[in-house]
Each structure stands twice: as C-alpha cells, then as structure tokens.
C-alpha cells in the first residue's frame, strides 16, 4: 500500500513537471493567424511569409512598431525574400509570437586529400541594436573528423563562447542519430547573445590525411535549431554539399521581445505596446523586454489598436 502511494505521488510529480515543461517550451502562433495582421495600408506578406505587427515591411514606413522591427522584402527575386537587415544573407522563414526563424549560415573548411585546405568560410551574425537574441532552442554543431570549431561573442564588457571537437578514423566511427564526438559534436550556446562569429580549425592529429579526407573532405560548423538537425553519420561526412542542405533546412531560432524594460517599467511609459484586453509578459532574457498576449477569451493582435476582441 505504501509503495502504491509512493508511486502515485511520484507519478503526480512527474506529470506536473511535464505540464510545466510543456508550457515553458510551447510556442504560439496567434499573431500570424490573427485577422488583424498589419497597420492600414501596410503589406502583411513577403511572398509566403506572413509579417504581423509589431513587425512591418519597409524601411521607416511606419508599418512596424519601431525601426528595429522593420523587415526588408526583396521582391526582385522569386520567391520574394524577407530579411532583418538589407544586407543579410539569412532570410526569414517564419515569425511566431515569441520567435523568428531565419535561414542558416554554415561555416566550412574543405581539404584536398593531402590535408591542405581548399576552401574556408567564416560566419558572423550580428543583431546588435535589434530586438533579437539567439534562442536556447539552438545548439552549436560541428561535423568533421579531425577538427574543432568554436563560436565567440565579444562585447566591450564581456566575452563568451562555446565549442567542441569531433574525431573519427574510419567512416564507421560516426553513428547516425548520434552527435557525441564521433564525426559530430554539439554544445549549448550562451544565453542572450545577439552577435557571434565562428571559426574552424584542423587538429592535425592524424599522420595519413588521405585516409580521413577520402571520406571526410569538409568540416562544417553552425548554430541551428537542435530538434531539426539529425546527423546521418558517414553519409554526412562525405557530403560536399551538406552546408547547402543545412542552410536550406535547419533554421537559426531568434527570440524577440519589445524593448529592454520589464512590464512594470514599460507600463509607466507612453509607448507601452500592449493594447486593450491583453496582458504583458516579461521576456525571460537577461536583456529584458516584454511581449503582449491576448487575455483568455479574446483574440487578435494585442499590439495593434483596438487590441484583442472577445471571441463570443
Ligand atoms: C499550461 O497551459 C495550459 C493551456 O495553455 C493551461 O491550461 C495550464 O494551466 C498550464 N499549466 C501550467 C502548469 O501553467
Ligand atoms: C497558425 O497556427 C498554427 C498552429 O496554431 C501554426 O501551425 C501555423 O503555422 C500558424 N500560421 C502561420 C501563418 O503562422
Ligand atoms: C491608405 O491609403 C489611401 C490611398 O492611398 C489613403 O486615402 C488613406 O488615407 C490611407 N490610410 C491610412 C490610414 O494611411
Ligand atoms: C532607411 O531609411 C533611412 C532614412 O529614413 C536611411 O538613412 C537608411 O539608409 C535606409 N536604410 C536602408 C537599409 O535602406
Ligand atoms: C512616419 O511617421 C512620422 C511621425 O508620425 C512622420 O513624420 C513620417 O512622415 C511618417 N513616414 C512615413 C513614410 O509615412
Ligand atoms: C595538396 O594537393 C593540392 C591539390 O592537389 C595541391 O595544390 C597542394 O600543393 C598539395 N599540398 C601539398 C602540401 O602537397
Ligand atoms: C555589430 O553591429 C553593431 C551595430 O550595427 C556595430 O556597432 C558593431 O560594431 C558590430 N559588431 C561587430 C563585431 O561587427
Ligand atoms: C595513406 O593512405 C592511402 C590511402 O589509404 C594509402 O594509399 C597510402 O599508402 C597511405 N600512406 C601512408 C604513408 O601510410
Ligand atoms: C534600453 O533601450 C533604450 C532605448 O532603446 C536605450 O537607450 C538604453 O541604453 C537601453 N538600456 C540598456 C540597459 O540596454
Ligand atoms: C516582470 O519583471 C519585473 C522586474 O524584474 C518584476 O518586478 C515583475 O514582477 C515581473 N512581472 C511578472 C508578471 O512576472
């Protein structure tokens, strides 16, 4: 009987943890599904991408809540591409109530079979002065057989970074679905970054490079959504165009929030963004900021006048 009670208590605790966890990680899409998408006379689409207010298309068109929420839409390409800055290589794939997903940029280093470097690309992403930080849904991933790579973020006041190394001496060392140091390694990224640069280095630990480079011509390093990337072992190691597959399929997740004030401080200001029938939630990031959510039983765009509307 005691054991049964104990099991019951454990089960209750476990299920509590699950619901709590599910709420923390659950992502909502009420903004881009709302009928009140954009300000009057403002476009709410760039190709297939829905751009809900507080975001807005154009440079200083007054369509966004403030300049840093402006989205650039390049209609000269087909399909049209939206980006955060005009010169950004990454394009926006999706905007949710708390996150923006953008296409990836992969750092790479490729080798001739004798081990000398044939091509090399560094990556730098800089969203300083924008409302974005790199989400903890991302991981830093390195794919290669004799390499280490790192990312670093340096401001005047602090320097943070992470990195890892990956080895393998035969293609069989690398296992599909396992990114644990054999041909693939992963690390968590520091919180609240809005800038990073990546680097790839060769370890030169193997005497006979032609052995390794015959099944692993390139090393790749990128920050991207963990749940979307699956390492395919030897297939990925020998793939010359893996970088393109990652850039097409594994997004970088950015968290967004309004400003850098908490709800209480923002409410005291003139420019408080949350309209009628909505509530304010503090952003969880160190850099502050808040977001608005429609009250229960109301729907619409909480940032746009007249606010959220009753659903009955
Ligand atoms: C989780 O969210 C659901 C609906 O969004 C809500 O009904 C539930 O009370 C929440 N649970 C916790 C622990 O906050
Ligand atoms: C509308 O909401 C659903 C889930 O609630 C989401 O999967 C979908 O992506 C949303 N539509 C847009 C355009 O964001
Ligand atoms: C929208 O554009 C039309 C035509 O250009 C103009 O008459 C109207 O005043 C504009 N509305 C707003 C809210 O700017
Ligand atoms: C945006 O417009 C401002 C003037 O309002 C201009 O100074 C700036 O160069 C423009 N930026 C881009 C990326 O076009
Ligand atoms: C944006 O709004 C400001 C202030 O309300 C105004 O001075 C400016 O002309 C507007 N710009 C556009 C492109 O409508
Ligand atoms: C390695 O191979 C490349 C391409 O065949 C060649 O250009 C380079 O000189 C070689 N390097 C060495 C150190 O042998
Ligand atoms: C990042 O962008 C900001 C603002 O545009 C700029 O001041 C800063 O120098 C950039 N940082 C780096 C390392 O390029
Ligand atoms: C290096 O590996 C290649 C291919 O497996 C082989 O042909 C060559 O003899 C090896 N060289 C040395 C010095 O072991
Ligand atoms: C918060 O944002 C305001 C306005 O953009 C800026 O002037 C201020 O320096 C920011 N404060 C911090 C701590 O970043
Ligand atoms: C938001 O953050 C402020 C300042 O950290 C805090 O005083 C306030 O209680 C928070 N509000 C909520 C709803 O958590």
Image (tube, grey):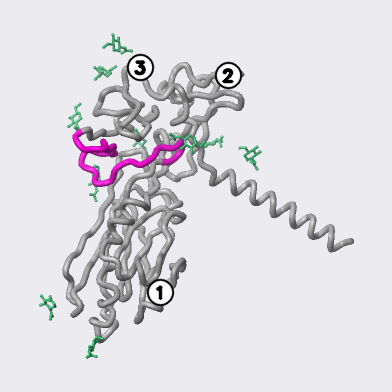
The region drawn magenta spans 76-99
Q: In terms of secondary structure, where does tag 2 sit?
A: strand
For the point 24% across and 81% down, the residue is 209
The reply, left or right, for residue 256 in relation to residue 7 is: left
Question: Of callouts 3 and 1, which one flags the residue occurring earlier in the amino acid sequence?
Answer: 3
Alpha carbon of mark 3 to alpha carbon of mark 2: how far? 21 Å
Alpha carbon of mark 3 to alpha carbon of mark 1: how far? 54 Å
Is ligand 3 closer than 8 angstroms to the Cβ of mark 3? yes
Does residue 41 show up? yes
Question: Of callouts 2 and 1, which one flags the residue occurring earlier in the amino acid sequence?
Answer: 1
For the point 58% across and 19% down, the residue is 310
Residue under numbered circle 1: 174
3 or 1: mark nearer the eye: 1
Residue under numbered circle 2: 310
Q: How busy is the neighbourhood of tag 2: few (under 14 within 10 Å), some, or many (20 plus)? A: few
91 part of magenta stretch: yes
2 or 1: mark nearer the eye: 1
Q: In terms of secondary structure, where does tag 3 sit?
A: loop
Which disc, if any, is residue 40?
A: 3
Q: Position of residue 21 (x, y in %)?
A: 60, 49
Contact flag, marks 3 and 2 (Cβ < 8 Å): no
- Check the image and report above or below for 130 versus 31: below
Which of the 4 quarters of the picture holds residue 62?
Answer: top left
Question: Of callouts 3 and 2, which one flags the residue occurring earlier in the amino acid sequence?
Answer: 3
């Amino acid at each position: 009987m005691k054991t049964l009670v104990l099991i019951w208590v454990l089960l209750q605790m476990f299920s509590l943890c699950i619901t709590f966890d599910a709420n923390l990680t659950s992502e909502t899409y009420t903004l881009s599904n709302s009928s009140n998408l954009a300000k009057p006379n403002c476009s709410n689409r760039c190709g297939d991408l829905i751009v809900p207010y507080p975001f807005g298309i154009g440079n200083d068109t007054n369509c966004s809540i403030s300049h840093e929420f402006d989205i650039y839409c390049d209609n000269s390409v087909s399909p049209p591409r939206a980006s955060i800055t005009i010169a950004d290589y990454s394009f926006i794939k999706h905007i949710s109530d708390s996150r923006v997903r953008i296409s990836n940029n992969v750092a790479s280093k490729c080798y001739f079979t004798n081990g000398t470097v044939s091509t090399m690309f560094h990556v730098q992403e800089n969203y300083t002065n924008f409302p974005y930080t790199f989400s903890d849904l991302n991981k830093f991933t390195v794919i290669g057989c004799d390499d280490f790579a790192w990312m670093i973020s340096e401001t005047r006041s602090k320097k943070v970074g992470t990195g890892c190394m990956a080895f393998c001496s035969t293609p069989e060392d690398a296992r599909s679905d396992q990114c644990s140091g054999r041909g693939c390694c992963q690390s968590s990224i520091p919180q609240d970054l809005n800038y990073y640069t990546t680097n790839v280095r060769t370890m030169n630990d193997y005497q006979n490079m032609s052995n390794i480079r015959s099944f692993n011509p390139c090393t790749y390093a990128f920050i991207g959504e963990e749940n979307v990337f699956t390492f395919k072992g030897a297939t990925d190691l020998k793939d010359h165009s893996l970088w393109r597959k990652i850039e097409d399929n594994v997004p970088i997740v950015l968290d967004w929030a309004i400003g850098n004030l908490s709800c209480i401080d923002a409410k005291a200001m003139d420019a408080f963004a949350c309209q009628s029938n909505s509530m304010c939630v503090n952003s969880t990031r160190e850099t502050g900021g808040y977001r608005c959510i429609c009250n229960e039983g109301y729907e619409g765009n909480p940032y746009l006048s007249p606010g959220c509307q009753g659903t009955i």
